Amino acid sequence: MNPGIRHLLVFLILTICAVPHAATAQEGALETAPPNDLSADEIIKRFVAKETEFAKARENYTYRQDVKVETLDGDTVDGQYREVFDVLFDDKGKRMENVVFAPQSNLTKIYMSQEDMQDIRHMLPFVLTEPELPEYNILYVGKQQEDELHCYVFDIAPKKIEGKKRYFQGRVWVDDRDFQIVKTYGKTVPDLCNGRPCNEVKKRGDQENLFPKFTTWRQQIDGQYWFPVYTKADDELHFKMEDVHIREIVKYEDYKRFGTNVKILYEGKEIPKGEKPPDQQKPQDQKPEDKKQ
């Protein structure tokens, strides 16, 4: 297939995936036979290298993240948290967040913890990089078709839980041509009780902090890397006091590469890099022709 046509098909497929009915996207049967073109270890090596490149590239992009967390009673929403923020760069090139919409939360059954905020920003758009690879067990599961994409499928789980670090546990789909994750399904771990992993100690009266299973879909941006575009969680959290139906939708929109080719103009003329406009220069900074006679 012509690469241009393939990328167009991929864009259309994952644009469709980036809507609430994405969970009904066409999946082929899982073929569990060992890969016959590359070894599982070689596939892991390649896709982790690509993910490492992608993680660095994404640090140079601005985007908007739209977060909505709801609790439901049957089909009725009885609580909602909402936040929309832009990931930008300040005038010194430092990465920053700018909140553009954040109404008062009216969640009553759950609360948004520090771990929830951390997961929304870093774990739902899961990226497996080379420095993190030793922390995970990775098991080749098979090959599966996701609409028009042919994917290698891997199950991933942390080898052990250390300190307050957050981990991903679940399944990823890796495109067999670009060797990048195109879909993620699983949850963040560990669940917490009084700030500690619940499997270490769980007793009556603990403050529970449980996390839902989620799916994240990616889309190819700028013809090279696969960026997260849509995350959905729809799960039942089993607290000791009650079960809570939670729904999360996170959209990642308007990706734009942050470049260093910004031109500074003064009275229609470009100011050379590193120089200030004349009206911002100190007398000792001015060129002889700029100084008043």
Image (tube, grey):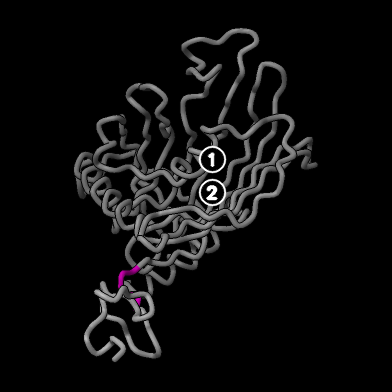
Callout 2 environment at 10 Å: few (<14), some (14 to 19), or many (20+)? Answer: many
Asked if disc 1 and disc 2 are in contact, CB closer than 8 Å, the reply is yes
Q: Nearer the viewer, residue 48 or 192?
A: 192
Residue 204: give x, y in percent of width and height. Answer: 64, 8
* 268 sits left or right of 208 in the view: left
The image's mark for residue 231 is 2
Residue 258: give x, y in percent of width and height. Answer: 37, 66
Residue 248 in view of the camera: yes
Q: Quadrant of the C terminus?
A: bottom left
Q: Nearer the viewer, residue 61 or 53?
A: 61
Question: Residue at the front extreme?
Answer: 293
Residue at image point 21% right, 44% down: 45
Residue 148 in view of the camera: no
Q: Establish if 278 lies above or below 180.
A: below
Secondary structure found at label 1: strand
Residue 33: give x, y in percent of width and height. Answer: 30, 40
Q: Nearer the viewer, residue 178 or 141?
A: 178
Q: Quadrant of the N terminus?
A: bottom left
- Which picture quadrant has residue 156? top left
Q: Nearer the viewer, residue 229 or 31?
A: 229
- To which residue does mark 1 refer? 214
| Residue 30 forms part of the magenta stretch | no
Three-letter amino acid code at the position of disc 2: Thr
Would you say the magenta stretch is mainly helix, strand or loop? loop
Secondary structure found at label 2: strand
Q: Magenta residues? A: 259-263
Residue 184: give x, y in percent of width and height. Answer: 44, 44
Ranked by sequence position, the earlier of labels 1 and 2 is 1
* 271 sits left or right of 28 in the view: left
Three-letter amino acid code at the position of disc 1: Phe
Q: CA distance from mark 1 to mark 2?
A: 7 Å
Residue at image point 34% right, 81% down: 278
